[in-house]
């Protein structure tokens, strides 16, 4: 699992995830996610290239969102594929973190 | 009847024995062996991507539970996974371990809100297994557990929805 960051206009940070967010993948990005959670306020998690999401990966995303929200920020999940989205809805994570498939709508939620 | 575990296990690594049987050691690193193995099954049996995803997800959750809880993160214990193509569009994975009895079919899990609020670690993986697998059956076998998990491909399995 690779994680990269792009800073966008309006204080929005795009976090791009690429690969499997399984146990190993979640461990790989854990430290970077903690840094983002503690320092960024408006985060778009670009999940288009996430090919797998398990419970450990869910916890990583939920922890990020809870921490940012507790600091007055917002997180949006952008573009998960159908299977990954089913994991998000089965677990109820979509109630905590909105999912958007339209990029402009995702950005708008963070303004 | 399983062959002796000693036949399959080496000191440090799992040994892949055949296309249909995968034997792992009780360490999280061995989970990396599963997706390529499932990919081969998927190729051989024309399993669609979503069903392959469900198999991978269920195995990740079931196996990590066995390793971390059943075997208490102790390495050197075997876990076997047997794949069977039952009929067109209908597949079964049977996971066997030698851990204390644990039944993910009936295990109580925390309310989802409590898990998402971080108040409980409670069974998020089990919730996913129950949502993504078809029929699931647990048996206590001598010295361990046998979990049989079925997957049906929509529009392929005779009789319609997942059994």
Image (tube, coloured by chain):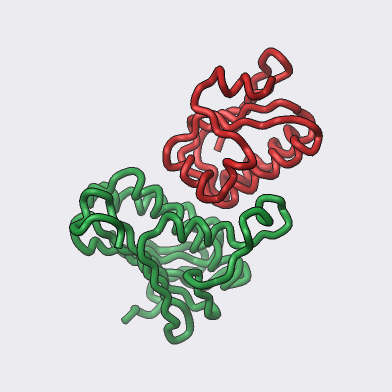
| Quarter location, residue A9 | top right
- Residue at the far bottom in the pictured view: B142
- Residue at the far top in the pictured view: A9
Q: Residue at x 67, y 59 (%)?
A: B121
Rendering coords of residue B69 (x, y %)? 60, 69
Q: Residue at x 66, y 32 (%)?
A: A75
Rendering coords of residue B52 (x, y %)? 35, 49
* Residue B17 appears in the picture as rendered: no
Whether residue B30 is situated above or below residue B148 in the rendered picture:
above
Who's red, chain-wise?
A: A
Q: In the picture provided, is B150 more to the left or to the right than A53?
A: left
* Residue B11 appears in the picture as rendered: yes
* Tint applied to chain B in the drawing: green
- Residue at the far right in the pictured view: A71
Which quarter of the rendered picture does the C terminus of chain A lie within?
Answer: top right
Q: Could you say which is closer to the camera, residue B77 or residue B126?
A: B126
Number of numbered callouts drawn: 0
Whether residue A74 is situated above or below residue A96 in the rendered picture:
above
Rendering coords of residue B71 (x, y %)? 58, 72
Q: Residue at x 70, y 36 (%)?
A: A32
Which quarter of the rendered picture does the N terminus of chain A lie within?
Answer: top right
Q: Could you say which is closer to the camera, residue A97 or residue B49?
A: A97
| Quarter location, residue B65 | bottom right
Whether residue A109 is situated above or below residue B76 in the rendered picture:
above
């Amino acid at each position: 699992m690779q994680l990269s960051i792009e800073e966008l206009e309006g204080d929005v940070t795009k976090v791009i995830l690429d690969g499997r967010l399984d146990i190993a993948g979640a461990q790989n990005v854990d430290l970077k996610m903690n840094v983002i959670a503690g320092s960024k306020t408006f985060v778009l998690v670009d999940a288009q290239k996430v090919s797998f999401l398990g419970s450990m990966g869910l916890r990583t995303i939920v922890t990020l969102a809870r921490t940012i929200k507790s600091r007055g920020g917002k997180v949006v999940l952008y573009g998960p594929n159908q299977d990954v989205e089913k994991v998000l809805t089965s677990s109820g994570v979509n109630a905590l973190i909105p999912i958007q498939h339209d990029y402009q709508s995702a950005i708008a939620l963070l303004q | 009847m399983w062959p002796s575990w000693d036949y399959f296990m080496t000191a440090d690594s799992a040994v892949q024995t055949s296309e249909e049987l995968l034997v792992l050691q009780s360490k999280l690193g061995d989970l990396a062996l599963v997706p390529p193995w499932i990919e081969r099954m998927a190729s051989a049996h024309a399993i669609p991507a979503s069903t392959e995803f469900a198999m991978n997800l269920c195995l990740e959750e079931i196996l990590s539970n066995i390793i971390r809880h059943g075997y208490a993160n102790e390495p050197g214990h075997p876990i076997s996974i047997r794949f069977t193509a039952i009929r067109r569009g209908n597949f079964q994975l049977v996971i066997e371990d030698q851990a204390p009895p644990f039944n993910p079919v009936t295990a109580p899990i925390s309310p989802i809100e409590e898990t998402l609020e971080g108040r409980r670690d409670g069974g998020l993986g089990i919730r996913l297994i129950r949502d993504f697998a078809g029929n699931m059956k647990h048996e206590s076998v001598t010295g361990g557990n046998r979990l049989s998990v079925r997957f049906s491909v929509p529009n392929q399995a005779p009789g319609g929805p997942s059994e």
